[in-house]
Image (spheres, helix red, strand yellow):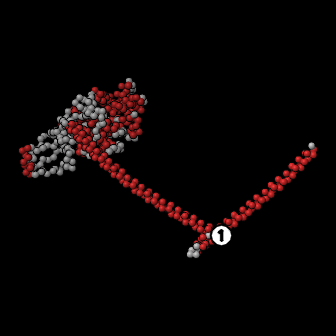
Amino acid sequence: AGELGLTKSLNSRPLTGMVVLVAQEVLDRPPSREDGVTAETEEQLRSFGAGLIQGAGLLLRLPQLTAVSAAALFQRFYFRRSFAEFEVRAVAGASLALACKLEENHRALKDVILVVHRLQMRALEEDDGASTFAGRPTPTLDLTSREFGEVKQEVLRAERFILRELGFDVATFLDPPHKYVLLFTSALQFPRALLQKAWGYLNDSLRTKLCCMHQPDQIALASVFLAARSLGIKLPDQPPWWEAFNAQAQSLKDIAEAIMALYSKPLGKHVGVPRRRPPQASSEHLGTLLSEGPPAKSPSDEEAAEPPAAETDGTATAPQEGTAPPAAGPQPQPAAASGFDSEPGREDRRRGAHRNGSEKRGKRDRQRDKRKEKDREKEKEREREREREREKERERDREREKERERDRKREKEKRRKIRCSISSGSLRSSSGGESDFSKSRSRSRSKSCSRSAGRRTGKAAKQKSKTKERRTKRSSSGSAGSASSTRSRKAAKRRS
């Protein structure tokens, strides 16, 4: 799955063909040898740093190309500087942060530091070999703590020195071999399984210093050779397949042996290396130094602007007057405790610091909960006060409604009395002192009453006349019917 997400980005990068390799004399005697770091320790630290970069890249969800570039920067830097000068975890974090900028996959520096610290906590083990934080959450680094400040200063310092030592032209060292594997497998028409196997060998080769010793196309060919051998795929031999790619058989064999040697060794672990410190004045000159005051700083001191917690870069300065000459060669001495130090008891103190930090965070959380509870109580009290105000307002509305209802009743009663006085005629007799408007209103009401009374009288007369007509008709029909019945009875008697 890794190569599918990188095919497009790898194909967009031009084939540089050649990269600058480390000189053979530097490969034979790297700077760490002068500080007493053995070849086995250096190899283990290189493997540990590259593995740390790959693990951090996975947690940060970075493309594999970014992790490859970071591993190349990491491996090359330690051929210019010693493991005794720069802590391996700080350089690994700085290389990853710098590779994110170069490959335009930006991640915040604090995120890189937190991920590296989390991987460091996961790697802690108890005396019996069990993981310290097995079955429980891995503690994180407090961004406001002093330890985070120290770690950040070390990472920033390592990043500056990486750029300085590589000449600020790091692109000449970054030519990943992964794109050559895609080209070779496509040219030879190999199956997909071989491509995946070769891709895995290339990822494992990042733990070694092969990227500083051989060209990337040679490393890619060696990974193809190992993948074909492990899968039982026969490579062309007439003519030899490596000659088609302008490679040497012995070079491919050396690279393959270096990669296969990784699988016979355990994974690299962090090893404590005594940190290099600048030479100090001898005790017999201490009184002279105190009497003459602090010595003047050298104008060529590159570390004058560095923070107090950072180590010096190891460059020699001219001895000041009144001080003892430094001893020949750098003398590795234990350095002061910093964010990445691993001196004896440092992990215990760190765990204690984490417990103290957890207690402080718990105390702050409890205080924050109390403040929130008080705020909630105040808000409830304000809500109750607002409810009381609304209840008073509703009571005032009810009182106003009752008052309006009483006014309507009084108006209605007044109108009823006026109508009664008009109907009885008492209003006309008592209207001497009324206004013209009241008189005209009374006259109009009296006229309307008289008209309604006339209408009622006319209706009653019409109803009465209709009733008489109906009675007359009934009586006339009744007399005619009785006469006919009498005649019929008489006729019946005669017939009998």
Question: Would residue 104 be found to the left or right of residue 304 on screen?
Answer: right
Question: Would residue 414 be found to the left or right of residue 469 on screen?
Answer: left
What's under tag 1, amino acid-wise?
Lys
For the residue pair 404 and 282, the one nearer the viewer reads as 404
Q: Is residue 254 visible?
A: no
The quarter of the rendered structure image containing the N terminus is top left
Residue found at x 31% / y 38% = 56
Residue found at x 30% / y 35% = 136
The residue under label 1 is 447
The quarter of the rendered structure image containing the C terminus is top right
The image quarter containing residue 106 is top left
Residue found at x 26% / y 41% = 358
The image quarter containing residue 332 is top left
Q: Is residue 127 above or below residue 465?
A: above
Q: Residues within 10 Å of mark 1 (few under 14, many from 20)?
A: few
Q: Residue 328's x, y, as percent?
A: 12, 40
For the residue pair 381 and 478, the one nearer the viewer reads as 478
Residue found at x 57% / y 64% = 416
Q: Residue 292's x, y, as percent?
A: 8, 51
Q: Residue 422's x, y, as percent?
A: 61, 68
